[in-house]
Image: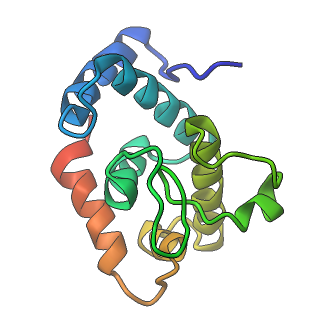
Amino acid sequence: SPARLVFADSREGERWLAAMSSRLARFIPDEGERRRLLVNIQYESSRAGLNTQVILGLIEVESAFRQYAISGVGARGLMQVMPFWKNYIGNPSHNLFDIRTNLRYGCTILRHYNNIEKGNIVRSLARFNGSLGSNKYPNAVLGAWRNRWQWG
C-alpha cells in the first residue's frame, strides 16, 4: 500500500507537510520530490513508533537527504543503512537506494536499538551509528532536530 500521512487530523497533517517542506527546500529544491519524501518519512517513522522529527534530524546528519549517498564504509541511501542488514531483516535482493526500502530498514534498525536501550534515544542513536560510548553522533542528530525539525 502506498505511504500516506499518519495524523489524527488531516488538516494537521497538511500543516505539518507544508512546514516541513519549506524547511527541506534547502536540501531538495523540487516541491513534489520533497512532499513525496516527507510523506514516506512520516509514514515509516510512525509505523516504527519513532519520532518523525528526530528521524528528519538523523537523515540530515547521515545523508543530507541524498537518496543515493554512499559512505566510506558502504552504508547506503537516506538513512545510511549497511548492506549486511539485508541478510538479517530483509532480503538480499532489496534495493537500499529505494526511498521506502531505505526508510523501512533504517526505522526498523533504530526501533530495535531503541527497544534494547529502553527508549534512551541518545544510546539508541549511538548504536545506530556504531559509536556507542560517544555522544558526538547523537548530539549532531539531536542538534539538527532542535535547530530545524522540531514541531508541536
Residue furthest out toward the top: 11
Q: Nearer the viewer, residue 55 or 30?
A: 30
Q: Nearer the viewer, residue 39 or 111?
A: 39
* Residue 46 x/y as whole percent: 55, 37
Total marks shown come to 0
Question: Residue at the spot x=53%, y=41% of the render?
Answer: 45
What's the residue at 38%, 46% (across, down)? Answer: 66
Quarter of the figure with the C terminus: top left
The image quarter containing residue 34 is top left
The residue sitting at 25% across, 43% down in the picture is 150
In this picture, is 117 found above or below 96? Answer: below
Q: Residue furthest bottom?
A: 133
On screen, residue 71 above or below 123: above
- Left or right relative to 4: residue 95: right
Q: Nearer the viewer, residue 106 or 73?
A: 73
Q: Quadrant of residue 88?
A: bottom right
Residue 149, given in percent of the width and then of the height, sits at 26, 43
Against 128, residue 13 (above or below) is: above
Query: Considering only vertical position in the picture, is 81 above or below 67?
Result: below
Residue drawn at 55 percent across, 31 percent down: 43
Q: Nearer the viewer, residue 37 or 115?
A: 37
From the top left corner, tell me how far across and down residue 135 is, in percent. Answer: 34, 81
Give the quadrant of the N terminus: top right
